[in-house]
Amino acid sequence: MLVVAPTQNWAWQLRRFVTPPPPVERCELCGAVIPSAHPHLVEIAARRLLCACRACATTLDHEGGALRRVPDRVHALPGFSLSDAEWDALQIPIGLAFLYRSTPLDRAVALYPGPAGAIESLLPIDGWSHIVARSPALARITPDVEALLVNRQQGEGQYYLVPIDRCFALVGLIRRHWRGLSGGAEAWRAIDAFFDALRLETAASHG
């Protein structure tokens, strides 16, 4: 039986990915006006994202500190895959999920997007170290701020190492477009467009 709980620590911030941005966005650390494209910091203990100006994102980002800057790098993992047995062990009810290492919880966390927001599986991810060991890119993943994003909705699956804010952007996109039990064509077109953009971004960075 799958035991899940809404991610209360992350849920509040989804409004920035669901609702239109305010006319003026401000740094949540110093109050300075910031552009729509701006850095994010993760408040590690609370597991929440903060919008930041570049100065705060640079000066307040310290390894082992209370705040860590969310990086920009996005990597496709073409040689990586999860077996059906590994995926089934996660008991994720849909073919989309993201996994990351949480410092406060001292364990790996698996979440999947739904029409009400991100849902966190409370089942232990016993095989995370084994999964990471199979990919040099995942072995260098930064806890709390980067995640393995998995799309197994079609075919063999797509696997990306992404900043954690990209994952919550996907959650917000799904929440904004989802209709009915199956999501509807509009939601799935939006999801496909999200992963098409990731594919093009990674192709350009390696081109």
Image (cartoon, rainbow, N blue to C red):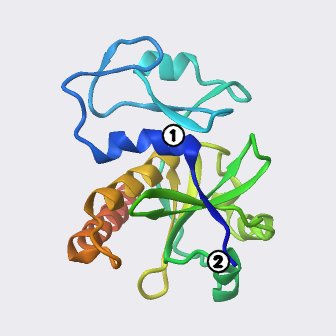
Residue linked to disc 2: 91
Which picture quadrant has residue 123?
bottom right
Circle 1: residue type: Pro
Which picture quadrant has residue 173?
bottom left
Q: How many marks?
A: 2
In this view, the residue in front, 42 or 54, is 42
Q: Is residue 88 above or below residue 23?
A: below
> Dot 1 lies on which element?
loop
Which picture quadrant has residue 174?
bottom left
In this view, the residue in front, 96 or 1, is 1
Q: Is residue 164 above or below residue 129?
A: above
In this view, the residue in front, 137 or 153, is 153
Residue linked to disc 1: 71
Image position, residue 158 (x, y; %): 47, 74
Q: Is residue 2 above or below residue 115?
A: below
Crowding near the residue tagged with mark 2, few <14, some 14–19, many ≥20 C-alpha atoms within 10 Å: some
